[in-house]
Image: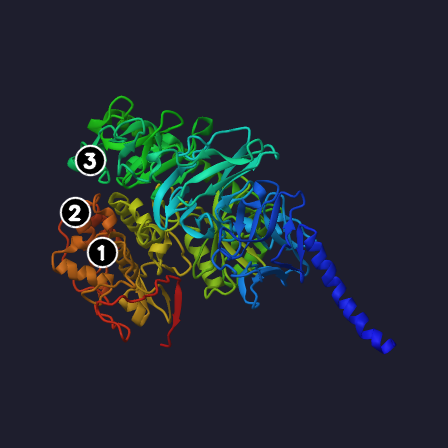
Amino acid sequence: MKSLMKPQKIRLAILLPVFFAVFTVSKADDTLFQDVVLKDGGNTIVSSGGVFELGFFSRGTSSNRYLGIWFKKISNGTTVVWVANRQNPIPDKNGTLKLISPGILVLVNGTNSTVWSSNTTTSVQNPVAQLFDYGNLVVRDANDEDPNNYLWQSFDYPTDSFLPRMKFGKNLVTGVDTYLSSWASPDDPSPGPYITRIDLNGFPQIFIRNVSSPIYRSGPWNGLRFSGMPNLKPNPIYNYTFVMNRQEVIYTYELLNDSVVTMMVLDQQGILQRYTWIDRTQKWELYLSVQIDNCDTYNLCGAYGSCNIVNSPACGCLDKFEPKFPNNWNDADWSGGCVRKTSMNCSSDAFQKYSGIKLPDTNVSRFNFSTSLDECQALCLKNCSCMAYTSANISNGGSGCLMWFGDLVDIRAYSENGQDIYIRLAASDVGGEGIGTARLVIILSSVFVFMAIILCLCIIWKCRKMKWQRKRPISRSSRYGQNWHDLETAEKSESHSKDDLELPLFDFVTIADATGNFASHNKLGEGGFGPVYMGKLEDGEEIAVKRLSKESKQGFDEFKNELNCIAKLQHRNLVKLLGCCMHEEEKMLVYEYMPNKSLDSFIFDKKQSKILDWPLRYQIINGTARGLLYLHQDSRLRIIHRDLKASNILLDMEMNPKISDFGLARIFGGNETAANTMRVVGTYGYMAPEYAVDGLFSVKSDVFSFGVLVLEIISGKRNRGFQHVDHRHNLVGHAWRLYKEDKALELIDESICTSYDPDEVLRSIHIGLLCVQQSPEDRPSMASVVVMLGSNYALPEPKVPGFYTERKLMEGDTSSSKISWSTNELTFTVLEAR
C-alpha cells in the first residue's frame, strides 16, 4: 500500500503549486510570478484598484487574438490602451503568457512558438510582472519597487494611447524612444501609417507623420507650452511638464484629480486627441484636439507664408514678403511659398519683429538657454545664414536664444497665445520696431566696448590669481593640491619639476563630482587618448575632461607632453588647459568647455553644415591659421602639432576656432625647425608625404595638414574617403583637377552657395593647394599663409600636390560605383624600423 501511495503523493506535491498559481491568476491578482502562466480563455490580471485589466482579446469578426491592457471599470472593457503582439496576432485561443528568468515576459502560441517578448539587460533572482492602477505593466525584482530599477515597462512601448505618468519622448541614456503609432483600423491594432514622436533635430518639437511625411508639427517648447498648441493651458484636470536635459527629452502629464479618467489617442486618421470619460453619459467625450483646423497642416503655405484661418484664402505672405510664384499663388497653389521683396545684404541687414505666430520649424536651428535676447540678435546678425531669432523661453519675462538657419516654414497666425519672432530683412525694409543701420552700429559698438572692458578685467584678475597661486603654499586638502606628490614623482623621472607647469591640479573627487562620476550622458566623445566628458565645478564653471583610457595606445608620455606644450601657451585660437589630475592609475586633463564641440560635427553633417555659412567658415580658416602661426613662431616655444584635423578644431559659443589635442605635439628649441622619428603618429588624410613615408616632420608638416583642412572646410567633404564618379583621387586631387580646369568654385559645399564671396573662396582654395605641395620647400610658412589670407596680392602658382595618385578601388568596384570608405578619425600610431 505504501508503494502505491508514494507516487500519488509525489504527483500531488507537484500539482498543488501549479493549481494554486493558476487559481491566483484566475482570482485577478495584479501580479504574475515566475513559472506561472496566463492562458487565453478567461484568465486575466487586474490592477489592485480594479482600474486596468491585462488579458487576451479580439476585435470585430476576426478570430485573431491579442494580449493587451484595457480599462476594466469603464466602457465595458472595450477601450484597449496597449497591445503586445500587434504585429503578430495568434489565430486561435491557444496563447499563453509567462514570465521566465532573468525577467522576460514571453507570449507563445499553441505550438509553443514565441510571438512576442519583452527585453531586459539586467538579471534578477526573483522577477515579477505587475499591473498598476495607472495602466503600466512592469517587470521588476519582487524585493525592489524603485521605478528606476524596473527591468521593463509597457509605458516605454505604447501603442496609440498616451496615459497619465507616461513619459513621451526619448531617454538619452538608455536610448528608449517612446512614441505613439495609430491602429490600422478600429478592429485591427496592427501599426497604422501615422506616428507621433518628439523630433530631436534642432530644437525638439513633436511631429505627426504619415509614414515619413510630416502632417503636423507642435512647434518648439517655449517654457509655457508648445508654440503650436495654444490650447495647452493650465487646467483643473491635469498638469503637464516638458523636460529637456542631458538625460532625457520628454513630455508628460499627471492628473490633479484621480477620479477623472483621461488619455490622449492617435486615431486612424492621424489626429491626436484628448478624451475624458463622462460617467453620466457613459461615453468618452472629446476634450481637445491637437490639430485645431486646416492651418495646422504642415507647411500649408510654404516658406515665409503664414496661415490665418479667419482669412480667405487662409494663406498669405508675411509682411515685407511676396509670393514666389504669383500665378500659382492666385490659383491656391501655395507650395512655392514667399520671398523677400528686397534682397538682403549680409553686412547691412536688420530684423523685423513679427508677433502672434506659431514659431517656424526648428529642424535646422541652434539654441542656448544662457544667452540673452540682445546677445542672440548679435550672434544671428554675424551669421549670414541665420534667418531669424527669438527667446527660447518666454516664461518669466523671456530668456535664452533660439536661431533659425535656412527658410522659415510652417508658420501660422494666432489671435492669442502667439509668439514674437525677429526675421532677417534688408535694412531698407525694416521700420518702426526694426533695427536701423545707425542704431545697429551704436549697439554693436557698445557691445564691443563692454566686451573689451570685461576682457581687461579678466586679464587683470587672472594675472593676480596666478601671482597669488605661485606665492601661496600648496595645501593637500585643497582641490588643487592633493596630487602634487604623484605628479612630482613622475616629473622627477623626466627631469621636470612641479614649478615648470604653473598649472593647477584637481583632485579626483572634484573631477568625479563635476562629471557625475563620469556618467555616460556627460560623455562628449572619444579619441585616441580616451573619452572626453562634460562637467561642471561647484562654482558653476563648465569644463571638459579628457580621461586617459586604459586601452588607449597613447600613454603617460602623451599625457605629459600635452601638459608641457599647452600649459605654457595662451592664445585665443588655442583651447585653454585649466589643469590636470593624477590619481593612482588615473590621468586626466581639464579644459575649458567648448559648447559647439568640434568642427567636424558641422562641416561633415548635411544639416549642421547649413549653420556654417561662408563668413563663419572663413573666420574659422583665419583663426586656425593664426593659432598655428602662434605655435610655430610667436609662442615662447616652437611647437609642431602633428595631428591637426577637423575633429581637433573646437568651436566656442561664437564659433571661434580653438586648436586642441597636443598629445602628439613636439617642442623644438632654438632654431630647430625639423626632425625625424621612428614613431609616425597622426591621422590618415592629413599627414604630409615626407612624414607619412620617411618620418620627417617640420613646421611644414602642419602646413600640409592645414591645407587639407582648408579644402575640407570649403567643400564639406573629407579628404580621406572622398569619392567621385569621374576619377579615383582624394579630395586634394579633386581640388587640383578643378583648379587646373578653372572650375575651382565647383568645390564649394552646397550649404554656402548663397553666402560665399567668390574672391575669398578662390583665394582660399589657392592657398589650400599651396599648403599641400609635395615638397615641404614649396609650401608657405604659416606667417605667409596668414598674410595671404588677409591681403589681395598675387599668389604663386601651386604645383602638383602631395599624394596626387589615383587610388586603386576594391576588387569588383568601378569608378562609378559607391565605395564604402572608413571615416574613422581616431589618432593612430605606426611603428617603423629605420
Rendered position, 636 above or below 409: below
Marks 2, 3: nearer the viewer = 3
Q: Which is nearer the N-term, disc 1 or disc 3?
A: 3
* Residue bearing mark 1: 768
**Nearer-N-terminus badge (2/3):** 3
Q: Which residue is mark 3?
A: 329
| Front in this rendered view, residue 417 or 211 | 211
Observer-side mark, 1 or 3, equals 3
Type of amino acid at the residue the image marks with label 3: Trp
Task: Identify the residue at the far right of this view.
Answer: 1
Q: Position of residue 691 (x, y in %)?
A: 31, 67
The answer to whether residue 61 shows anywhere in this view is yes
**Residue 758 - label:** 2
Tell which of 56 and 787 is nearer to you.
56
Q: From mark 1 to mark 3, how far is it between C-alphas? A: 46 Å
**Label 1 residue SS:** helix
Give x and y (percent) for residue 617.
Answer: 27, 47
Q: Earlier in the sequence, mark 1 or mark 2?
A: 2
Question: Which residue is located at x 71 percent, y 59 percent?
Answer: 21
Q: Could you classify mark 3 by the number of other residues whose Cα lies within 10 Å: few (under 14), some (14-19), or many (20 or more)? A: some
Residue 191 at what x, y percent from top left?
44, 52
Q: Quadrant of residue 585?
A: bottom right
Amino acid marked by disc 1: Gly
Q: Quadrant of the C terminus?
A: bottom left
| Amino acid on which disc 2 is placed | Pro
> How many numbered circles are shown?
3
With respect to residue 564, does 821 lie above or below? Answer: below
